[in-house]
Amino acid sequence: MQSGLKFTNRREEIAEIAVRDLAKKYGTPLFVYDHSSIIARYHDLDAFDAVRYAQKACSNIEILKILRKEGSLIDAVSEMEIRRAIAAGYPIERENAQSPYPIVYTADIFDRGTLDLITGDAPVHVNCGSIDMIQQLGERAPGRDITLRINPGFGHGHCQKTNTGGPGAKHGIWFQDLPKAKELAANYGIKITGLHMHIGSGTDMEHLAMVAGAMKEAVHEIGSSVDTISCGGGLPIPYKEGEICVDISEYHRLWNDLILELQEEYGHPISLEIEPGRYLSAESGYLVCEIRAVKNQENNVFYLIDAGFNNLARPIMYGSWHPISIASSDGRKLPEEELDVIVGGPLCESGDIFTQEEGGFVSKRSLPIAKVGDYLILEKAGAYGASMSSNYNSKPLAPEVLIEKGNDRMIRKRQTFDQLIMNEIF
């Protein structure tokens, strides 16, 4: 576990390639991913029996392929995420009855397209987050194996919008409804082989002990058919200086103790899965932007950049903090002097501010004095950056570039105007 991490607000390189070279080659705004960071974070989790990447964090097919080659499984939350996983080479079927499922669909509903897909051409395993899903699957494909996502009655998160447990959360089957879910599954010959519990972000060990206790009760309710437990995702990363990294070994120990106890009780192996998304991709990603205006508004200085919440929505949605750094556009050394500045984007919205806190309160950052044409880098943007991007204000989706062993290559082109309007009928 690391603590007291230091961040810098000056950055000339990403993975040993000059920021200005990347910006001039690919244009801005631009997502850049460091391949080595993804690999390192993945192998932090080697103690778990299976690592299932929650691809909603960053779903570029090349990122999925990188993780597949390392041995990762995949979590999909939509029809198109299932199709992305298949396009990245993940098999639909598992190798044998003891192997983990390569792709799991986790959701609280079946939209009609997804139900058609998983009962037709791509019969992937389903992690049901509602009782209605069990019935709808049973009517179309009786006799399948499923996992249940459980809402234990409490949650946790760095803000209310990331809390995925408790009575105010839409996710999971309410813990008191497990007998009903078990009975309905039996009516359709469906076997419940796994339980999943993800209650939000954060890894307070006292809180996680409550989650493990709730999982134990859920296993006792379902019984000996359970051979897989998923402790979900939500592993945090440090965004601010001094924040403490999660103690992976302690996190694993807490869950493994439960697994050992249940294996002794039921007399058969039980696999322990973890489902990270942000943990694997966030630190790898950088959103490289160009400063297009420096404005003085009474006592405030604004750096206005060419990326907005259409590119990175986390600050406006959650009040999320991202480290910010500056790179000179001409190779000059940045001055030692710094300014307290507000960083904003180009969108026709007052809320298009990257330096804000939860609730929309604008804050400031101390950054080097910069000029128009210099580059501003929003760091740790590899999770919920590109994957949450939109075309608001008719802005094109930004390109994505991967750096591997000192070589940069494009893994998604910048969206063109023709692509932007191609599905419109006029």
Image: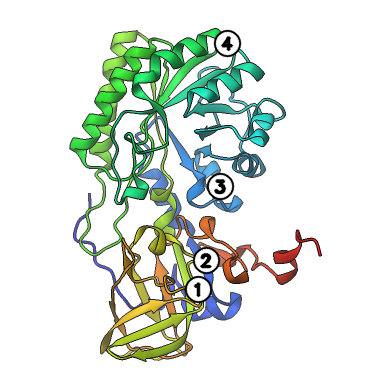
Query: Marks 3 and 4, how far apart in space?
Result: 34 Å
Picture residue at 36% right of the left edge, 49% below the top: 161
Q: Is residue 322 left or right of residue 64?
A: left
Residue 64, labelled with which disc? Answer: 3
Give me the C-alpha separation between circle 3 and circle 2.
23 Å
Tell me the kind of residue under disc 1.
Ala
Q: Percent position (x, y) of residue 110?
A: 59, 32
Q: Is residue 97 left or right of residue 223?
A: right
- Residue 29, x across and y down, in percent: 53, 73
Q: Image point 70% across, 70% down: which residue?
A: 416
Q: Quadrant of the C terminus?
A: bottom right
- Viewer-side label of 4, 1: 4
In this view, the mark in front (3 or 2): 2
The answer to whether residue 269 of the structure is visible from this angle is no
Q: Nearer the viewer, mark 3 or mark 1?
A: 1
Specify few, some or many for label 4: CA neighbours under 10 Å numbering under 14, 14-19, or 20 or more.
some
The residue lying furthest to the right in this view is: 426
- Asked if disc 3 and disc 4 are in contact, CB closer than 8 Å, the reply is no
Per the image, the residue denoted by label 1 is 307
On screen, residue 90 above or below 395: above
